[in-house]
């Protein structure tokens, strides 16, 4: 994900040029580094970045968050710079099957800040979170019940599905590399992630949901209702962001 110390390029010519400049610099450095740099200094410069070549990341670009793959990285004087490729679906998806979920600006900023704390500063989220994902979903349903007088079966099913998606997706695509050990130490067969993790990780699911829902066999009318409910849920999260 982007930061003041991270270069994110989605322009092929720009990325190619940057790669060549980086390769040239590495070649020229190799003539002098062997004489002036110890092995420990070399490892410090090139082996301690938060992301690795080929690793999938969430990249912040043009006010939106995309899944991307690290092609190359370089530790420059002003910090780590990354050259990434934004991942696309291999086959075209009909526009009516694409669910648009736009995160409010404050929630997008929270995602970026969390990324900085975890990947650059090594500060993991303390577990268990209060409230947990389970708590947050229940709070939202209670909120809708008080506002509408009832909660329809379809709304209950939607958020039951969100809980299932979260529990399945978390270990597969919602964790940063540095969070993996914490997950392994915390989650067992009889403990669901939704009873331990909180809003920080739930937001990451919403970045992934359009990709996940495209692959689900859901009718267009149902997708439209789903989109409306999810947008409403994100507004609820935004209003209660600091609670």
Image (cartoon, rainbow, N blue to C red):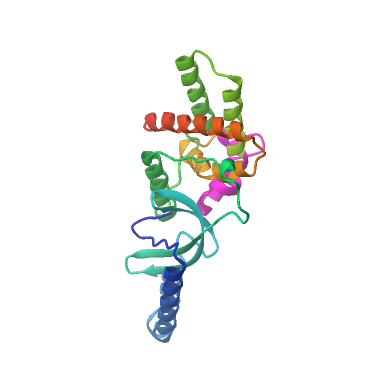
Residue 243 visible in this rendered orientation of the protein: no
Q: Which range is magenta?
A: 168-194
Quarter of the image with the C terminus is top left
Looking at the rendered image, the quarter that the N terminus falls into is bottom left
As displayed, is residue 16 above or below residue 213? below
Q: Residue at x 61, y 52 (%)?
A: 92
Q: Report the residue at 40% width, 68% height from top.
A: 75
Q: Position of residue 66 (x, y in %)?
A: 48, 51
Q: Is residue 147 visible?
A: yes
Q: Foreground residue, 28 or 84?
A: 84
Res 6 → quadrant: bottom left
Q: Is residue 93 above or below residue 74?
A: above
Task: Count the numbered circles shown.
Answer: 0
Q: What's the magenta bit mostly, secondary-structure-wise?
A: helix
The spot of residue 193 in percent (x, y) is 58, 37
Image coordinates for residue 236, horizontal then vertical, percent: 43, 28
The residue at the point 39 percent across, 38 percent down is 104
Q: Which quarter of the picture shows residue 14?
A: bottom left
Q: Position of residue 155 (x, y in %)?
A: 57, 24
């Amino acid at each position: 994900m982007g930061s003041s110390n991270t270069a994110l390029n989605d322009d092929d010519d720009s990325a190619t040029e940057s790669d060549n400049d980086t390769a040239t610099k590495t070649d020229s450095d190799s003539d002098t580094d062997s004489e002036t740099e110890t092995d420990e200094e070399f490892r410090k410069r090139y082996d301690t970045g938060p992301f690795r070549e080929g690793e999938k990341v969430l990249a912040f670009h043009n006010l939106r968050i995309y899944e991307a793959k690290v092609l190359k990285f370089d530790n420059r004087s002003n910090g780590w710079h990354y050259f990434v490729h934004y991942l696309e679906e291999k086959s075209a998806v009909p526009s009516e099957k694409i669910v648009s979920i736009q995160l409010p600006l404050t929630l997008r900023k929270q995602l970026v800040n969390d990324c900085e704390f975890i990947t650059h500063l090594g500060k993991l989220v303390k577990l268990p979170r209060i409230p947990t994902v389970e708590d947050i979903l229940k709070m939202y349903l209670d909120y809708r019940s008080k506002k509408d007088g009832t909660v329809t079966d379809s709304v209950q099913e939607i958020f039951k599905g969100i809980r299932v998606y979260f529990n399945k997706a978390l270990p597969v695509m919602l964790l940063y590399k540095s969070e993996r050990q914490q997950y392994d130490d915390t989650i067992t067969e009889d403990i669901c992630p939704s009873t331990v993790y909180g809003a920080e990780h739930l937001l990451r699911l919403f970045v992934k949901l359009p990709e996940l829902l495209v692959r689900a066999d859901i009718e267009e009318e149902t997708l439209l209702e789903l989109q409306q409910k999810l947008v409403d849920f994100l507004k609820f999260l935004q209003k209660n962001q600091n609670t």
